[in-house]
């Protein structure tokens, strides 16, 4: 399931991120890629321990803690601190799949990458190309979202970033270890939760709401790792 999470960051927070990233120390993005991905990756990134990355990553993590749609879709257990990349003209990232386990920089901890996330920081009209293309069972889906919006998709997906042909594309990216590792089960829970919320708005006194909420939480008990 590919899920759009709108307005993760406010316009002011996006502006703060872009101002800081304009002064950042960008490095070759291949240092964080696996040996297969290095051949198809052409971009720049901030290092995991870069002070700017850590400061801006904290802004994003605080915003995500308050985002109900992200929580419902991801059912997050652990988050890798956000990283930041930049694609300039001629740069792209060919088809690849993210590694299943990622270390948390500066710690002995690791997370399982059940979900991948891209948070767009450049307005789509400011650059040409640069679409995130995700393959799933129904084919290819493309995302190029307004600054401050985020797309969430299964870490098992093959995906790519199309070449940027004008301007540059800034984004944050990170991974989520979910309480429910299976994408099909997460999708069932997400759709059930959304249906319960719609019923709660439309017929708040309906007796089936409690029953449906019970089904949701009992499924979560069955499927959750934590």
Image (cartoon, rainbow, N blue to C red):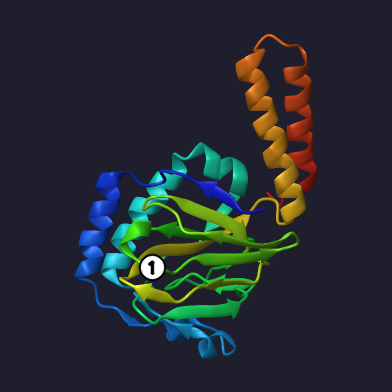
The image shows residue 121 at horizontal and vertical percentages of 35, 58
In depth, the one of 180 and 20 nearer the eye is 20
Q: Position of residue 118 (x, y in %)?
A: 48, 60
Q: Nearer the viewer, residue 88 or 81?
A: 88
Horizontal placement of 211 versus 121: left or right?
right
In the image, 223 versus 10, the foreground residue is 10
Picture coordinates of residue 189, whole percent (x, y)? 72, 40
Residue assigned mark 1: 128
Q: Is residue 84 above or below residue 57?
A: below
Say which quarter of the image contains residue 27. bottom left
Judge whether residue 75 can be spotted in this image.
no
The secondary element bearing badge 1 is classed as strand
Residue 206 lies, in percent from the top left, at 73, 11
Q: Is residue 204 rendered to the left or right of residue 51? A: right
Image point (36%, 47%), residue name: 9
Mark count: 1
- Tell which of 111 and 145 is nearer to you: 145
12 to the left or right of 3 = left
Does residue 25 appear in the picture of this structure? yes
Residue located at (24% from left, 72% from top)? 24
At x 67% / y 12%, what residue is drawn?
203
What residue occupies the far top of the structure in this picture? 205
Q: Does residue 146 lie above or below 140 as drawn?
A: above
* Few, some or many residues within 10 Å of mark 1 (<14, 14–19, 20+): some
Determine whether, in the image, residue 162 is placed left or right of residue 98.
Answer: left
Image height of 184 relative to 46, above or below: above
Where on the picture, by quarter, is residue 120?
bottom left
């Amino acid at each position: 399931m590919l899920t759009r999470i709108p307005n993760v960051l406010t316009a002011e927070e996006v502006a703060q991120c872009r101002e800081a990233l304009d002064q950042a120390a960008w490095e070759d993005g291949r240092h964080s890629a696996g040996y297969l991905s290095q051949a198809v990756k052409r971009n720049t990134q901030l290092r995991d321990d870069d002070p700017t990355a850590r400061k801006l990553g904290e802004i994003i993590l605080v915003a995500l803690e308050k985002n109900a749609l992200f929580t419902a879709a991801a059912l997050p257990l652990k988050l890798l601190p956000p990283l930041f990349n930049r694609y300039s003209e001629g740069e792209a990232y060919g088809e690849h799949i993210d590694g299943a386990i990622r270390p948390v920089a500066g710690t002995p901890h690791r997370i399982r990458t059940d979900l991948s996330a891209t948070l767009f920081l450049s307005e789509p009209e400011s650059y040409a190309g640069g679409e995130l293309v995700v393959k799933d069972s129904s084919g290819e889906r493309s995302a190029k979202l307004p600054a401050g919006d985020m797309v969430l998709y299964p870490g098992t997906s093959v995906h790519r970033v199309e070449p940027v042909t004008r301007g540059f594309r800034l984004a944050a990216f990170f991974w989520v270890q979910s309480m429910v590792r299976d994408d099909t089960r997460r999708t069932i829970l997400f759709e059930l939760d959304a249906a319960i919320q719609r019923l709660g708005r439309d017929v708040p006194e309906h007796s089936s709401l409690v029953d449906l909420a019970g089904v949701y939480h009992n499924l979560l008990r069955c499927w959750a790792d934590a």
